[in-house]
Amino acid sequence: MIQQRSYLWVTLSIILLTFVLNMLGPAFDLVNIALVYLLPVLISAVYGGKGASFYAAVLGVLAFDFFFVPPQLSFSVSDLRYVVSFGIFLFVASLTGGLAAKLKNQLHYSKQREAYTASLYALSKEMNAIADFQALLQHITLKVSHTVQSESVIYLPNERDELEPASYSMPVPAWAQSEAEMVIAKWVYQHGEHAGKGAGTLREASGRYIPLKIEEKIYGVLSVNLGSSAPSSDMLKLLEALGEIAASAIARVKLSEEAKLAHLTAESERLRTAILDSVSHELRTPLATVIGSATALIEGEGMFSPQDRMELLVTIRDGSLRMNRLVSNLLGMVQLESGMLRLRKRWCDVEDIIGVALKQVKDFQQHRKIRVQFLKQVPLILGDEVLLEQVLVNIISNAIKYSPDGSEINIMVNKEEDAVFFSVSDQGIGIEVSERERIFDKFYRADKSKHITGTGLGLAICKGIVELHGGTISAKPNGEKGLSIVISLPISDEDKIFFIHEEGEQAPV
């Protein structure tokens, strides 16, 4: 249709030009008229191609001969020199028309190359921003299909290293799953060479099969359905470039996943080693104490006074409680890590939670003084009472462990806006500013505390439980000496109607 319009335009332009030249005939000699007839030739070469330009040249010669060369209104020529002129005109017209058409083709080729380059750049840029493997495969097939205007599919090996379609440019094209196409794709995957239409191998196939290969590693096969048409050399180069970009993107994501897996494996191994070291050390000390005290009671039944026997029994009890806390922390961390920990929420009395926690730490607080103060009216809170008690036990235990005997530990409870705040402040060794966030990480031990036994799990468990309740936990210095652990638990409007403590109430322990 476009070609027909080009010939129609040439015909009309020659007719119009002839009419105008006839009107202005006396003002032009024959040489100028012949040059004017070159204009439709050049224009038609640019917009209509070589065929249209040659048609314009022939039609221009005929019009020039019939209307302007004597004898006029006749195709006969009285002077043979005009025949030579006609030949030169046709030669010049064909030459200029051919050059114009060639320039047009080169322009079209340049634009096509520019479009291909832009498409490759866009594809490469977009692929670098995709981290999910399945999303990357889908993006590759869609982009390739859009670029070459044809169906595409990516074949990848499964767990058994058997090749199978992994992503399509459209819902499961039939040709991609045919037995013949699968055989070709497997051959390309095994040999790492191009095959299919336009290649040296299996060129009768309807698709072009490109190995997704980086160095000696083959990740899969990209297949494009080219139908019955023979692909141009530029199309083959484009497909090869698309295959290289796709292979690079797939290799990048694969290597990234392998790096993450290696990191997780290394981290798991580090955690396993840390757990074994901490648990073996933490269990060995109280276990040795329990075994030693029990052995002494059994073998020296008549050697100990009632007071000595009571001290040995207290030692056994303290060692058992220490091991029980360790096992509870390990189980709590496992539940947090696996997502199995579930809150059993009910209305909780803050005073009861603190009271239970203080009873659990009373046996090893020695001569430390623990003071509890409620700064404002505090409502009942909705939470898991057992887990909140575990949080306070861990924090108070740490305060006892890292502060000198005879020092004071302050527990303050306050209500501000929509939250209840607990703070446990000691007069112990404190921590550096850079470690205030890290002490809530699993197995982290502050430099100042490494000479004291511990697993580094207590505060990590506290953080997990508090965050399950929608709260926060943080550490800050307690004046010039010691540390304060602050917990914030949210309260709802319903909680505010249940106030149980008067402002300023204190309870020394």
Image (spheres, rainbow, N blue to C red):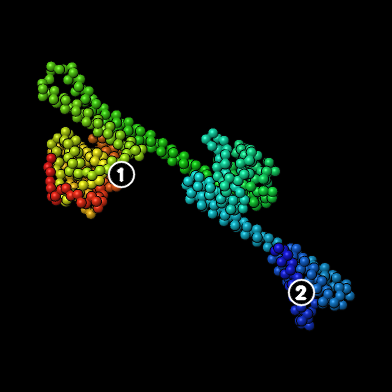
- Residues 308 and 417: in front is 417
The residue under the point 53% across, 49% down is 139
The residue under the point 25% across, 30% down is 323
Q: Which residue is mark 2?
A: 15
What is the three-letter code of the residue carrying label 1?
Leu
Whether residues under marks 2 and 1 lie with C-beta atoms below 8 angstroms apart, the answer is no
Residue 385: tell me if it is visible: yes
Helix, strand or loop at disc 2?
A: helix
* Residue 157 falls left or right of residue 380: right
The residue under the point 22% across, 38% down is 393
* Residue 372 falls left or right of residue 40: left
Residue 395: tell me if it is visible: no
Q: Position of residue 426 (x, y in %)?
A: 18, 43
Q: Which residue is mark 1?
A: 468
- Mark 2 or mark 1: which comes first in sequence? 2
The residue under the point 47% across, 46% down is 132
In this rendering, is residue 298 above or below 361? above
Helix, strand or loop at disc 1?
A: helix
Quarter where residue 210 is shown: top right
What is the three-letter code of the residue carrying label 2?
Ile
Q: Position of residue 217 (x, y in %)?
A: 55, 39
In this rendering, is residue 467 above or below 274? below
Q: Residues within 10 Å of mark 1 (few under 14, many from 20)?
A: some
State the quadrant of the N terminus. Answer: bottom right
